[in-house]
Image (cartoon, grey):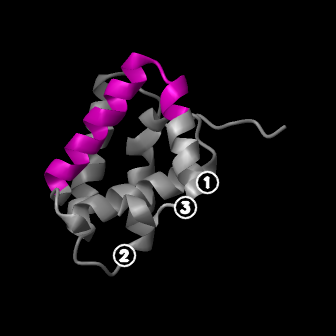
Amino acid sequence: MIEELGAGIKAKIVDRWKLMSETDKAHFINQVALALSVWGSDDKGRELVVEVLQYMSQNGTSTLADFGIYVEKLLESKSGSGRIAKIKRASLILDGYRIKHSLPSEPHREIPM
């Protein structure tokens, strides 16, 4: 799972975590917990979390609190998967969470320098 992330991606995640506010950290934790409650906390559920983290790092998001936005990316990559219904359900739940807590629907991205 997390071992599959390259050292560069792990470093980005740790750097993002250090720069995040306590509120954003709580939103990230809550969104991952909600996703795992639907996907299961087994290896397959954790693999989906790792995939979302990979999408986030590739897209240049500046906060892990954007986790829920990137779950929809899994729908594209897992279209033939038996987990598609669970991914859709998690996406809907996370959308509701983000709306309830007034989180943006667009990711925060770094501006390349």
Q: Mark on residue 6?
A: 3
Residue highlighted by disc 2: 79
Q: Determine which of the numbered discs, if any, sits on residue 34 in the image.
A: none
Task: Please tell me whether residue 4 is drawn above or below residue 90 in the rendered image.
Answer: below
59 and 6: which is toward the camera:
6
Magenta extent: 16-38
Kindly give the residue lying farthest to the top in the view shown.
22
Q: Secondary structure at mark 3?
A: loop
- 59 relative position to 35: left or right: right
Name which residue lies at 32% across and 22% down.
101
Screen quadrant of the C terminus: top right
- Measure how far apart labels 2 and 3 are at the Cα level: 25 Å
Where is residue 6 drawn, in percent x and y? Answer: 55, 61
Residue 8, labelled with which disc?
Answer: 1
Query: How many C-alpha atoms fall within 10 Å of the one at disc 3: few (<14), some, or many (≥20)?
Result: few
Residue name at image x 50 percent, y 57 percent: 54
- The type of residue carrying mark 3 is Gly
